[in-house]
Amino acid sequence: MNQAVLILIKPDGLKKSLTGNILTRLSESKLEIVAAKMVRVSKELAEEHYQHLKGKPFFNELIKYLRGELHDRRKVMALVYWGEDAIEKCRELAGSTNPEEAESTTIRGSYGRITTIGVYENVIHASSNEAEAEREIKLWFMPEEIIVDLYVTTQVLEKERKKKAWA
Ligand code: DAT
Ligand code: MG
């Protein structure tokens, strides 16, 4: 069954110049990239993304980590991969959440670490199931940023709004 999955290359992955290596690993899946962009992550976006972990002792550090405050890289790379069993394939290539427990051949096992204060710097995010993937993709991307029609859309009339354009 074809599925979509949100992948984030987290700030540690960017700082360690691992983007190419990570994309090469993910390409083993033979999935199609249907969206990609760099994102400066607001506190609101980070907290919404990790809403299921609100209240955990590591939540505040996790939000700082995703926003790049721990790596002086205030951005992440966000991608949507699409194809047969995309979630399982990407989660397998990513490896376990805890990078010390992840198989050494996986992305997290190869490049992740746990910091002395206990942050799991695990290099990438991959959605964990179809419902989460849909929620996350809709959170990170607008419909026109994705080159296939993944989810039902609606037409909205945009009120007059200032936006940046090429001069
Ligand atoms: P995953 O990212 O594998 O889907 P998750 O959704 O349970 O795992 O957690 C999201 C992130 O939160 C994870 O990538 C790293 C961090 N995290 C999870 N459990 C943690 C823990 N026990 N200590 C520190 N960070 C943790
Ligand atoms: Mg998760």
Image (tube, rainbow, N blue to C red):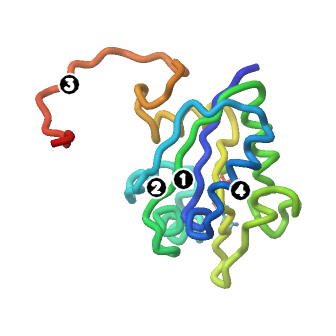
Mark with earlier residue (1, 3): 1
Residue 43 lies, in percent from the top left, at 39, 59
2 or 4: mark nearer the eye: 4
Query: Do the residues bearing badges 3 and 4 touch, measured as CB atoms within 8 Å?
Result: no
Mark with earlier residue (2, 4): 4
Please give the residue where the numbered disc 4 appears in the rendered image.
21
Please give the residue where the numbered disc 2 appears in the rendered image.
47
3 or 4: mark nearer the eye: 4
Residue 131 lies, in percent from the top left, at 62, 31
Under tag 1, what secondary structure? loop
| Three-letter residue code for mark 4 | Asn
Residue 50 tag number? 1
In the displayed structure, 12 sits above or below 90; it is: below
**Mark 1 CB near ligand 1 (8 Å cut):** yes
Please give the residue where the numbered disc 3 appears in the rendered image.
158
Under tag 3, what secondary structure? loop
3 or 2: mark nearer the eye: 3
Category of crowding for the residue at label 2, using alpha-carbon neighbours closer than 10 angstroms: few (below 14), some (14–19), many (at least 20) = some
Query: Do the residues bearing badges 3 and 2 touch, measured as CB atoms within 8 Å?
Result: no
Task: Identify the residue at horizontal 38%, vertical 57% (top origin).
Answer: 42
Quadrant holding the N terminus: top right
| Three-letter residue code for mark 2 | Glu
